[in-house]
Image: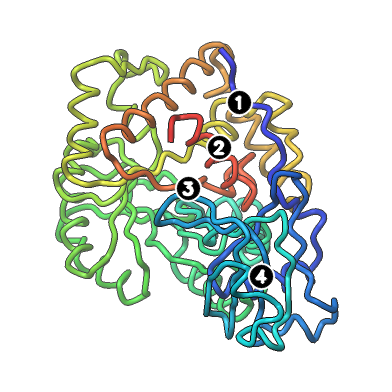
Amino acid sequence: MTLPRRLAPAQPPVAAMDRRDFVRGAALTGAGIAFGCGGEGRPATRASATGDAADEVPDRALLIDRASVFDVRSGAMRPDTSILVRAGRIEAVAPAGELNADSDAAAGAARIDGTGLFVLPGLIDAHVHVTHILYQSHMTGDEVLPFYLGHGVTSIRSTGDNVPAQRLIERYADDHPDISPNVFRCSFLIDGNPPWHPDVGWYLATPADVDPFVADMAAWGVKTLKIYVGTGREVGRRVIEAGHEHGLVVSGHLLDYHTADAVRDGLDCVEHIYTVSNFLLDDPDDRHSINLDSDEARRLIDVIAEHGARVDPTLMVFWGTLLFMDLPEVYGHPDHDPMPARLKAFWDKDRERRSLDWGAAPVSVREGTWEKYLRLTSMLHEAGVQLLVGTDAPEPQVAPGASLHHEMEFLVEAGM
């Protein structure tokens, strides 16, 4: 069994980027696109034609000349293609023979030589936290936002955080688009009593408590409601109903509320692959006893597919935080080097705790569980379930920004 623990560092390495690099990326971010390196593996150079700070003003037209562009409709790369961006919007995409530095349309535009590089839509991390974990690290969310943008992640989706603090972080991101992704906010974690995570949890005792809470969350402007492990079906079902009445997405990291029941009740998104696998255990007291060949496994996958629920596997958090946190190639990964010292200090402290829990099983057992997570992800994909790409950053050993590149690697390994 070969386990993909020896991940190469994500590119571009944030440690090698200064603020000017982030500012140069702002023009791309405004257009919702991200740069990557080509076959030679060199990092994208976001310099303007002259290198002057004046050329970094986002309002100036920008020509990305002779790059390979990923066409999301056809799923193919379009070589030797140019993109013209003006006022933060993509104005034109055309073959370089038709759109180039000599074209009238690109007159006066700053030029980036895209030879050997590729351009793709800005990445979205669909599962992050912007106060949770950072609170425990004595940090605020604005401190990690540049790491996302520095790795081409132009939008992040919170999946449970302190609501007023999220609003401040979103405001910071809106005021600093040159170094920040778009931030989509979430409710507190709707949980049992006491909440599993007191810093971001909120206890709803009965269905009667749901409507005022959901109305309050909608007034705060959140986009997602998150049902957490201690919420049962009676309350959870009303959260789904009330959330949909307010036009909100409802997601769930579930335990007391069976995933099949939640999906039948209208849950929009299942968070974490073990929110599926935890209901497929031969031994309820053994998280590793996942049976993917059972009738129950097929029925659960079919229910998720039939009802159109999405699944966000967040494989990175299992690789980094839960299954292999005690292995040097994981906790010593180069992607962690540029992370703030306070965040890494919390990661180190958390690793000691996790090693006595998830890390107590032999590595061979944990490897087997990892393979089952990959296989289950593949089974969901083959059944037609739409998968989201999220990481659970900044959980320990899940570096903001860089981890999304590895999440995509793992999804490819799972058969996507």
Mark seen at residue 64: 4
| Chain-order first, disc 3 or disc 1 | 1
Name the element at disc 1: loop
In three-dimensional space, the C-alpha distance between marks 3 and 2, rounded to whole angstroms, equals: 12 Å
Name the element at disc 4: strand
| Chain-order first, disc 2 or disc 4 | 4
In three-dimensional space, the C-alpha distance between marks 3 and 4, rounded to whole angstroms, equals: 28 Å
Could you tell me if the residues under marks 2 and 1 are in contact, i.e. CB atoms within 8 Å?
Answer: yes
Could you tell me if the residues under marks 3 and 2 are in contact, i.e. CB atoms within 8 Å?
Answer: no
Seen at 77% across and 67% down, the residue is: 21
Task: Answer left or right for 277 relative to 164.
Answer: left
Q: For marks 3 and 1, give the one nearer the viewer.
A: 1
| Chain-order first, disc 3 or disc 4 | 4
| Chain-order first, disc 3 or disc 2 | 3
In three-dimensional space, the C-alpha distance between marks 2 and 1, rounded to whole angstroms, equals: 9 Å
Q: For label 4, count other residues whose C-alpha is less than 10 Å away and answer few (under 14), some (14-19) or many (20+).
A: many
Mark seen at residue 390: 3
**Residue on which the image places disc 2:** 409
| Chain-order first, disc 2 or disc 1 | 1
Residue 73: x, y in percent? 40, 56
| As drawn, 277 above or below 350 | above
Amino acid beneath label 1: Pro
Q: For marks 1 and 4, give the one nearer the viewer.
A: 4
Amino acid beneath label 4: Ile
